[in-house]
Image (cartoon, helix red, strand yellow):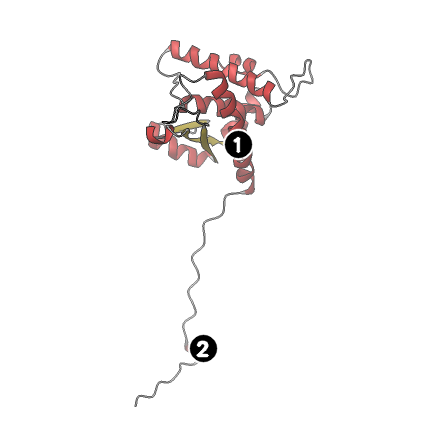
Amino acid sequence: MTNITTPRRDSMEKPKAKPKKAKPRSSLYALWRNKASKRLVEVLVCVDGCVGSKKSRQKSSSKRKVRLTAEVEVVDSKEMIKLNHRFRGKNQPTDVLSFSSPQVFREFGYLGDLVVCLPVLKKQAAEFKHAPASELDVLLVHGVLHLMGFDHEKSAKEAKKMQKLEAQVLEALQGSFGVKKVKGPKAAVPSLSLILRARS
């Protein structure tokens, strides 16, 4: 019979430190993601109404209308640089990236995914002198139109068409969800179509 002795406590190895877990996404980014997700639902309704059935709706075999859906993520500049470099070959942050879903998902209304860069959103809001929430609307509408196949980089004609649609959707978005235009110097929410004109 073998006698097994238990080692003394002081001679035992100390347990190795647990590897550090990745820091959870900050509450600020979670808050903006939640805000963007809710607003995206409203944007999709307005885009579907403005663009119409030719571009936006895919019919199922039962010929019923399909509700449009998409996902949105809000990231920091570092993450956006990685994504922009990987998918567009540009080593800088951009405001929004659109990733269209395969056709099989589009038939069920799922358009794809959007990625919004929060620092760029805030910077552009400051540059155009409007609220970050208004800039979020602009970026979501722009991204959704890309998901639907519009591309302002193809040609000047396509850019004008897309800009016109953006203005229509943004105006519908303001009117449909209780955002009132306020005239005068204390206007909290500027006309979003004016924001678009300022960018061109």
Depth order, front residue of 185/92:
185
Q: Residue furthest top?
A: 157
| Residue for point 41% across, 77% down | 11
Circles 1, 2 touching at the beta carbon (< 8 Å): no
Depth order, front residue of 15/153:
153
Quadrant of the snapshot with the N terminus: bottom left
Q: Secondary structure at mark 2?
A: helix
Q: Quadrant of residue 57?
A: top left
Q: Secondary structure at mark 1?
A: helix
Q: Residue 173 in the image: x percent, y percent?
A: 56, 20
Which label number is shown at residue 36? 1
Q: Which residue is mark 2?
A: 10
Q: Is 82 situated left or right of 169 in this image?
A: left
- How many marks the image carries: the answer is 2
Residue type at mark 2 is Asp
Which label number is shown at residue 101? none
Residue type at mark 1 is Ala
Q: Residue 3 in the image: x percent, y percent?
A: 34, 88
Q: Residue furthest front?
A: 62
